[in-house]
Amino acid sequence: MARVRKAIIYFAWLITCCAAPAGDGPVIREALLTPGFDGILRAVPALLQSGGAKLIEKDGTRYFVAVGFASVLSDSPAERVRQLEVARTRALKVASEFIGTTIVTSEEKFSKKTTVTNLNGVKASARRELLEETTVAKIKALVNAPPVVGTWKSGDGQLFFYAIGTQIR
């Protein structure tokens, strides 16, 4: 039930936020960035565009940020929940790989199938596209996940990003 509440809150955030200004950095849409991490995330455009994990130093303070992403298949509420789950899992994956305590495997399959039938001289076709994403994690140590510091979509709206991060002392 807590996951459903959290997904509803994130869904509301995604609906109410607006496009982030492009400036000199990469174009992102529907950005919701935590005020303290806004400048930190924008300081590393590669994280905004392709995800990953990084230690970032800004104004003498060090921050750890991990960004995961998921493909955007539609605008349905169930799809938005899927995007949150997949992107969060991938953010945790890159964070864990950065620390080196977890073995995580991801697999994506995209298949297209077109069927053409000829019945009494009438041709009919059907097309099916399927995207499957599977992530399996084997954790060897307990790591507290940093809080979410931002969500956004790519400029073309095809990818959803989820960032977690924390200040390092």
Image (cartoon, rainbow, N blue to C red):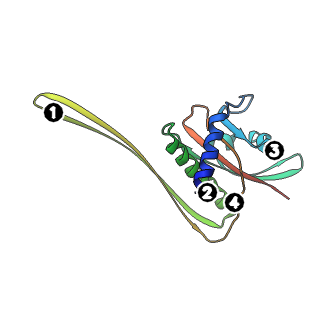
Residue at left 70%, top 63%? 144
Answer few, some or many: residues within 10 Å of disc 3's Cα (few below 14, many 20 plus, some between 14 and 19).
few
Residue annotated with mark 2 = 2
Which mark, residue 8? none
Task: Spot the residue most to the left.
Answer: 120
On the question of residue 169 being in view, the answer is yes
From mark 1 to mark 4, how far is it between C-alphas? Answer: 55 Å
Q: How many marks?
A: 4
Residue annotated with mark 1 = 118
On the question of residue 152 being in view, the answer is no
| Disc on the earlier residue, 3 or 4 | 3
From mark 2 to mark 3, how far is it between C-alphas? Answer: 26 Å
Q: What amino acid type is highlighted by mark number 1?
A: Asn
| Disc on the earlier residue, 4 or 2 | 2
From mark 1 to mark 2, how far is it between C-alphas? Answer: 52 Å
Residue annotated with mark 3 = 36
Circle 2: element type: helix
Q: Residue 5 in the image: x percent, y percent?
A: 61, 51
| Disc on the earlier residue, 2 or 3 | 2
Q: Nearer the viewer, residue 120 or 2?
A: 2
Asked if the residue under mark 3 is in contact with the one under mark 2, i.e. CB atoms within 8 Å, the reply is no
Q: What amino acid type is highlighted by mark number 4?
A: Ala
Circle 1: element type: strand
**Is residue 129 left or right of 34 when viewed as pictured?**
left
Answer few, some or many: residues within 10 Å of disc 2's Cα (few below 14, many 20 plus, some between 14 and 19).
few
Residue at left 25%, top 33%? 125
Asked if 137 appears above or below 112 in the picture, the reply is below
Q: Nearer the viewer, mark 1 or mark 4?
A: 4
Q: Residue 66 in the image: x percent, y percent?
A: 69, 52
From mark 3 to mark 4, how far is it between C-alphas? Answer: 18 Å
Answer few, some or many: residues within 10 Å of disc 4's Cα (few below 14, many 20 plus, some between 14 and 19).
few
